[in-house]
Amino acid sequence: MDKLGSSPNADRLSTAESLGVNTVRLILQVPAFGFPTPSATMLSELHQAVDMASTDQLHVQLTLFDAFGVYDQLANSAQWRRLFSLGTRTTQR
């Protein structure tokens, strides 16, 4: 498993695609990305990972708020989710 922040591995995505995988899951950890405002660096790395997956014809599934425990931050959570849904590109086949 690769982590954003540690250079997403294009070779692993190519290998996954060659084995018949059609979807990869990216789990976004809130503390790593920044809350309520994601860091520009992490957003850039997310875009890079999505672009690499797209190159190999892989769908990307984002998992937001994995193990997130700040339940009284509903407005900030909605803002964070909107940033990711608007700020990422997906491919449709």
Image (tube, grey):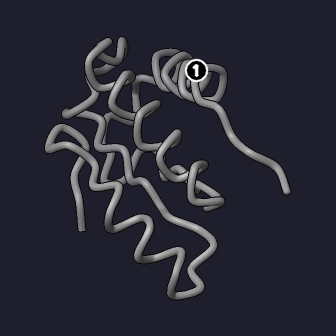
Q: Image quadrant for the C terminus?
A: bottom right
Q: How many marks do you count on the picture?
A: 1
**Residue 92: x %, y % from top left:** 82, 49
The reply, left or right, for residue 9 in relation to residue 25 is: left
Query: Which sits in the foreground, 56 or 31?
Result: 56
**Vertical arrangement, residue 46 with respect to residue 57, above or below:** above
Q: Mark 1 points at which residue?
A: 87
Query: Which sits in the foreground, 53 or 39?
Result: 53
Dividing the picture into quadrants, the one containing residue 59 is bottom right
> Please, which residue is most extreme toward the right here?
93
The reply, left or right, for residue 33 in relation to residue 57 is: left
The structure residue drawn at horizontal position 69% and vertical position 40%, both measured from the top left corner, is 90
Please name the amino acid that badge 1 sits on: Gly
**Residue 13: x %, y % from top left:** 41, 64
The structure residue drawn at horizontal position 58% and vertical position 20%, both measured from the top left corner, is 87
**Residue 14: x %, y % from top left:** 44, 67
Query: Which sits in the foreground, 49 or 77?
Result: 49
Mark 1 Cα shell of 10 Å, populated few (<14), some (14-19), many (≥20): few
Dividing the picture into quadrants, the one containing residue 4 is top left
Q: Image quadrant for the N terminus?
A: bottom left
The structure residue drawn at horizontal position 32% and vertical position 12%, both measured from the top left corner, is 40
The reply, left or right, for residue 52 in relation to residue 31 is: right
The structure residue drawn at horizontal position 36% and vertical position 12%, both measured from the top left corner, is 37
**Residue 79: x %, y % from top left:** 54, 16
Q: Is mark 1 on a helix, strand or loop?
A: helix
> Please, which residue is most extreme toward the left here?
6
